[in-house]
Image (spheres, rainbow, N blue to C red):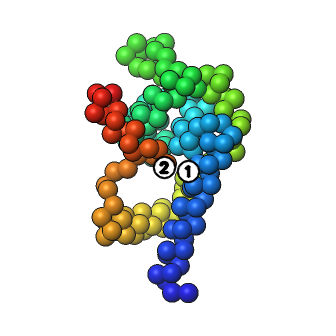
């Protein structure tokens, strides 16, 4: 197998694993894998801010904000004013949010983050640079929503002023 075939096969395996994980989350809890990933992060560190959540999910604040809004609307997360700073909104799981987490095993995004964090820093940096070179070479957008979140929903929310 050539190096090119190995790379393409690895990408196929990764995409397949992400799809399987997303379908499992949809079937078991009625939420996307990205929503489960956000729920999981909030569950691990209750009372975090949106900025802290964006950092923990390795995504930009606008992408995670759209997911949090959907989770709030679904009754899985709530935004609460911080006791020590009324300007700060903290995110916490509701009872339904905790129940949704129990229904779904760990999703692929969590596994990817854990696997990448286990790599030595130099290998992580090299992998990130190489992968980004590949994406730049094929003209991939510089910023994307969280995995398997509907871009159409994002665009609609922005055009509606949300």
- As helix, strand or loop, the secondary structure at mark 1 comes to helix
Image coordinates for residue 92, horizontal then vertical, percent? 56, 24
**Gap in angstroms between the C-alphas marked 1 and 2:** 8 Å
Q: Callout 2: 10 Å neighbours few (<14), some, many (20+)? A: some
User: Which quadrant is home to the C terminus?
Assistant: top left
Q: Callout 1: 10 Å neighbours few (<14), some, many (20+)? A: many
Relative height, residue 30 to residue 7 (above, below): above
User: Is residue 67 shown to the viewer in this render?
Assistant: yes
Furthest-bottom residue in this view? 1
Does residue 54 appear left or right of residue 138 in this picture?
A: right
- As helix, strand or loop, the secondary structure at mark 2 comes to loop
Q: Which mark is residue 109?
A: 1
> First in sequence: mark 1 or mark 2?
1
Image coordinates for residue 25, horizontal then vertical, percent? 63, 43
Residue visible at 53% across and 61% down? 15
Does residue 101 appear left or right of residue 5 in this picture?
A: right
Does residue 160 appear left or right of residue 105 in this picture?
A: left
Label 1 with label 2: CB-CB less than 8 Å = yes
Q: Which mark is residue 147?
A: 2
Q: Which one is in front in this view, the residue at disc 1 or the one at disc 2? A: 2
User: Which quadrant is home to the N terminus?
Assistant: bottom right
Does residue 23 appear left or right of residue 144 in this picture?
A: right
Give the camera-side residue of 28 and 106: 28
């Amino acid at each position: 197998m050539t190096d090119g075939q190995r790379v393409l096969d690895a990408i196929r395996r990764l995409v397949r694993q992400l799809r399987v994980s997303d379908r499992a989350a949809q079937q078991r809890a009625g939420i996307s894998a990205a929503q489960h990933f956000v729920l999981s992060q909030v569950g691990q560190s209750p009372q975090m801010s949106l900025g802290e959540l964006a950092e923990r999910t390795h995504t930009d604040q606008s992408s995670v904000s759209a997911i949090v809004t959907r989770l709030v609307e679904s009754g899985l997360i709530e935004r609460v004013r911080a006791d020590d700073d009324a300007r700060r909104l903290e995110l916490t799981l509701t009872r339904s949010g905790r129940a949704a987490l129990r229904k779904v095993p760990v999703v692929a995004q969590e596994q990817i983050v854990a696997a990448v964090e286990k790599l030595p820093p130099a290998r992580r940096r090299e992998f990130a640079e190489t992968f980004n070179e590949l994406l730049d070479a094929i003209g991939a957008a510089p910023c994307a929503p969280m995995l398997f979140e509907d871009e159409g929903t994002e665009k609609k929310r922005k055009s509606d002023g949300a």
